[in-house]
């Protein structure tokens, strides 16, 4: 393998047409919310998600503790209607001060 065949994985790779893939809305959109472990963390996340997706069903969430129990990830799926909705949801989750990452 020569140096010309290697690429920096921190940079996005080439895509067809040079554009990133588009999401077709509405669609089911999986989200993982990571924050400090607490008894009410999943409930807080669900309350916020419900404000942005009135049809959200909390019965489908999955709460996964970190290896050492310090963090929790709440995995869920919403019905995404557009980029504005997703951006507002992500901003409100982060504004709680309890969320470290939304993926």
Image (tube, helix red, strand yellow):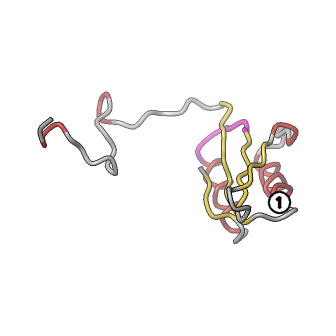
Residue lying at the far bottom of the rendered structure: 97
Left or right: where does residue 34 sit relative to residue 17?
right
User: Which quadrant would residue 69 be assigned to in this image?
Assistant: bottom right
- Residue 80 inside the magenta-drawn segment: yes
Left or right: where does residue 5 sit relative to residue 27?
left
Picture residue at 88% right of the left edge, 38% below the top: 59
Residue 12 placed where, x, y %? 34, 44
User: Which quadrant would residue 60 be assigned to in this image?
Assistant: top right
Q: Tell me the quarter of the image containing the N terminus.
A: top left
In the figure, 18 relative to 45: above or below? above
Q: Give the range drawn in magenta.
A: 77-83
Picture residue at 62% right of the left edge, 54% below the top: 102
User: Which residue is denoted by mark 1 in the rendering?
Assistant: 44
Residue 83 placed where, x, y %? 58, 45
In the figure, 79 relative to 51: above or below? above
Residue 91 placed where, x, y %? 64, 61
**Tag 1 secondary structure:** helix
Residue 61 placed where, x, y %? 80, 42
């Amino acid at each position: 393998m020569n140096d010309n065949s290697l690429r920096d994985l921190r940079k996005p790779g080439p895509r067809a047409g040079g554009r990133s893939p588009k999401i077709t809305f509405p669609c089911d959109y999986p989200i993982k919310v990571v924050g400090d472990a607490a008894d009410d963390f999943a409930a807080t996340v669900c309350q916020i998600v419900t404000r942005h997706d009135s049809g959200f069903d909390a019965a489908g969430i999955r709460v996964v503790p970190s290896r050492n129990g310090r963090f929790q990830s709440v995995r869920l799926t919403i019905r995404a209607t557009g980029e504005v909705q997703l951006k507002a949801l992500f901003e409100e989750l982060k504004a709680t001060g309890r969320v470290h990452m939304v993926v």
